Amino acid sequence: MKRIRRRELLKQTAARTAAVALAAGAGAVPSILRSTVARAASVGREATFVVADGTEPNSLDPAVGTGPFQAIINAMFDGLVQWNEKGQIQPALATSWTSSGGGRIWTFSLRPGVRFHDGTPFGSDAVKATIAHILDLSTPATRRGNYLLIKDVLTPDEHTVRFVTDPPNPDFPLLMADGSAKIVSPAALKTYGQDFGRHPVGTGPFAFEEWVPNDHVSASLNTAYWGPGSGVRRFLYHPIPESAARVVVLKTGEADVVLDLPPTDMDALRHESGLAVYATPAQTIAELEPAQTKPPLKDVRVRRALNMAIDKDAIIKGIMRGFAKPLHSPGIPGLWGSFDFAPVPYDPNQARQLLAAAGFGGGMDLTINITAGRWAGDLQVVQAVQGYWANVGVRSTVRQMDFATLLVGSSSDPDARPGALTSLVKSSSYIDYHLYRMYDSEATNVPGTQQRTGYGNPEVDKLLAQERSMFDQPQRLPILKRAQQLIWQDQPLIYLFQMVNLWGARAGTKGFVVLPSGDFVPGGLRRT
């Protein structure tokens, strides 16, 4: 087994980090496989499938843990339905589904004979418990707002679950494919309560073993899995914040798949033997989310000025090396129902005028909160934004923190954090999900939700409520367009760019997909 010792890895990382101008102090490089091999010598590297990404999980509870570490959650949990690489949903723990009652009732037939990793049987009671867990205000569910339409979960028998929604919603099966809706063990929920995220129990192809913070999460093969069998016996997720270190473990073979590769290394990696790298379309946008219930960020002129002050094309070309696309929409380009509008130009002079008109001609003080390493180049991009804002008199402080702390802040009352912005990425697989959670005042004000900016526009709320209850897809389009037009006028976010998924895999690895959302999904892992 090829393995780089910690000292050597740190030395290489430091050199490469300097080369790509990453900020110092972004976090320690994990010890890669050393600690895991020491604990589990009976299972060698050849029987372990390793995925590396940039973020330490904040939780292994699907309702709470949403982020680039989705690979390990996908390895341990299943949903009722799941996305495939073509953007279609397909059966998982549910084998079929129908709607009735004018679209207010969705009935799912459940797969028989499935058991959770703790041995308890999967059935309709588990689905009901999962939804109750998401809606429970004591659960810091980052996407709770999207589930508020569920008014009841009925369990007529063990293998049938019936959702009652208000309003009716044509996209409800798509919501059930979201990572936050993966089904959890009711018995484990009862045993561990709010500590379930440290003791995750699902029905997935791998069962939780251990979580060593800032080093790895490991899971062992579930030999009774209902889906495709795997050719490996253990799955490991390694959080490696430094993008240069992620490149190292891909090149040396210490990781089978590495996500969020740095744009600066893509050309060189394409010439490396024994691996393949990919730049695939992404349903993800990079943005800054302002707390906008109080000045200065409450004023649309300020938010527009902050957008106009940033040369986003220069950031895309220079830092992202062209591996990103400009954003001219509050939606996600490429999704059905997403519309583009007139670009917000790079115009620092007009930005200064807008700031002066809003009463901030003498400048203002802002704070940008970030967890560095969530995607390659994130800290550099935020530092570039800081420089552009300084050019128009906006003084900003960049505060780095771990992801769990970041989420606590971004989900707190926006009234308590005027002048604060959070660096986040948002992935969505269908347009209503994205527009509702990001811009509907109900969703942006729900305690605990990740996107708690406080943004609200009554006309937008009305339009979104109208379109999301319509089952005639063509009739939804003009309503979706008008809603997005109003949102674009409000400029509620600092829109940076649409991302491109940059990832690599060792030759011969198969049995997985990387979705447009950037999620790694195992499906019978193999090496040849």
Image (cartoon, helix red, strand yellow):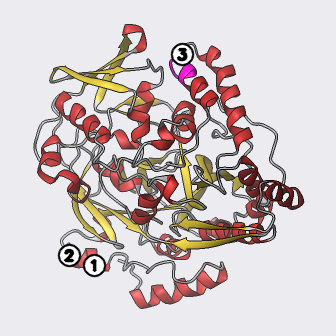
The disc at residue 46 is none
SS at mark 2?
helix
Q: Marks 3 and 2: in contact by CB < 8 Å? A: no
Mark 3 or mark 1, which has the lower sequence index? 1
Amino acid type at circle 1 is Ser
Residue in the foreground of this view, choosing between 491 and 133: 491
Q: Amino acid at mark 3?
A: Met
3 or 1: mark nearer the eye: 3
Distance between the alpha carbons at the discs numbered 3 and 1: 53 Å
Q: Quadrant of residue 430?
A: top right
**Residue 68, position as x, y percentages in the image:** 46, 57
| Cα distance between the residues tagged 2 and 3 | 54 Å
The circle drawn on residue 470 is 3
Q: Say which of 295 and 161 sits in front.
A: 295
Residue 362 horizontal/vertical position (percent): 79, 68
Q: Is residue 351 left or right of residue 471?
A: right
What kind of element bears circle 1? helix
Left or right: where does residue 199 sit relative to residue 358? left
Q: Are marks 2 and 1 in contact (CB under 8 Å)?
A: yes
Q: CA distance from mark 2 to mark 1?
A: 6 Å
